Image: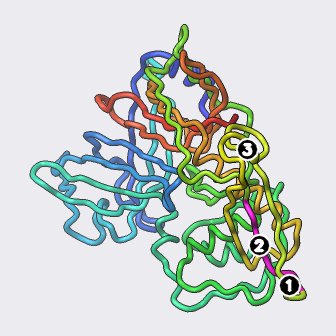
Amino acid sequence: MITLSAEAASVLTGSYRLRVAVESWLGEQLLAEDVPVASASEDVDRSLRVPERIALTVPRHDRGTSWSPVTDDHPLAASGQRLRVQLGVDLGGGTTEWIQRGWFVVQESTADGDAVTVEAVGMLALVDEARLVSPFQPSGSLVSTLRGLVEPALTVVVDPALADRSVPAGVNYDEDRLGAVMELLDAWPADAAVTEDGYLFVSPATPSTTPVLTLTDGAGGTVVTTAGKSTRDGAFNVVVARGVAADGGQIQGVAYDRFGPKAIGGEFNPLPVPFFYASPLLTTVAQCTAAAETVLARRRRTTARQFTVRTVPHPGLQAGDTVAVTADEYTGLCVVETLSLPYTAGGGPQTLTVRSLT
């Protein structure tokens, strides 16, 4: 979660006014410090390769300026322009607390009538579209390989809790740069997300069990409605991760889902339901087992109990945050998988998809 002051957090429990400020940058050059915004929203989905997407509606003419992207260096052109989005919480008395929501790459801008519609995407789009021109053969460690794949599009920051290790000889990545990044993270095992400051932060692939926020429909609560969903599509209760040892022999590690409604040997299916994962970055049984545990946790996440929550917009909440949900139909810890956040008045409530951690 993006950090807010205690005063702002208190304001968010009731009715408040949310402001939005958008800057446009091209490299180190500030093209516009105050893009006029008529309406705006953000959507995030952790299951997508590039999770973040924002949509803006801008008046075509404002304060003597044309916001139609007619030149390559226009603030809303899609020639490398990046939008810095800040949200402000009105504290009353003329005071606004501003927080940075993130950096986004302009994907498309279209002038139509009196308005310009702008679509911008998360910074991982720079890595996703940058296919490898020639095979990439890493020769250093996991950290140096990740940096070689991502930088200078994104600066990599690694949590000190993660242990680095050498990449085995013979590893080769062909065209899919972002796919190589995702394979590396699974084999580490680690997770990565672009921060509100535009860095790629790499951390252990273990969800926190400490909630950053309580969503409740009780007294003083902010939840509007909750609705549940359950599926067995894509569910597995065993993950087999395979690699290659230093002597060339195949090795593997296995992780079993032993708890919960889809546990192995339970009523979900009395037989094992395996998912197979392989990576040349795995060179020991311990590495295979750790990778299997990480992939299993992700697979469990996709089929865990799912709830749709509609709540008063919270500008600090992010996908991947752990929240406590207390409602008539469910109480427990959940992880935010998707969110839709209106930036402007009239956008309605914030919609979250959360999945149970239990």
Say what amino acid the circle numbered 3 marks: Ala
Q: Report the Cα–Cα distance between label 3 and label 1.
A: 31 Å
The percent position of residue 72, horizontal first and vertical second, equals 28, 72
For marks 2 and 1 on the same chain, the one whose residue lies earlier in the sequence: 2
Q: Report the Cα–Cα distance between label 2 and label 1.
A: 11 Å
Residue at point 46%, 53% (across, down): 52
Range covered by the magenta-colored residues: 239-246
Residue at point 69%, 68% (across, down): 277
Q: Residues within 10 Å of mark 3 (few under 14, many from 20)?
A: many
The percent position of residue 56, horizontal first and vertical second, equals 30, 48
From this view, report whether residue 240 is shown above or below residue 56.
below
Q: Residues within 10 Å of mark 1 (few under 14, many from 20)?
A: few
Residue that numbered label 3 is attached to: 263
The percent position of residue 134, horizontal first and vertical second, equals 55, 91
> Is 311 in front, or is 263?
263
> Is 338 in front, or is 242?
242
Q: Place residue 92 in its image quadrant.
A: top left
For marks 3 and 2 on the same chain, the one whose residue lies earlier in the sequence: 2
Q: Residues within 10 Å of mark 2 (few under 14, many from 20)?
A: many
Residue that numbered label 1 is attached to: 249
Q: Which secondary structure, mark 2?
A: strand
Q: Which mark is residue 242?
A: 2
> Is 27 in front, or is 128?
128
155 sits to left or right of 203: left
Q: Which secondary structure, mark 1?
A: loop
Question: Are the two marked residues, 3 and 2, in contact with CB atoms closer than 8 angstroms?
Answer: no
Q: Is residue 332 visible?
A: yes
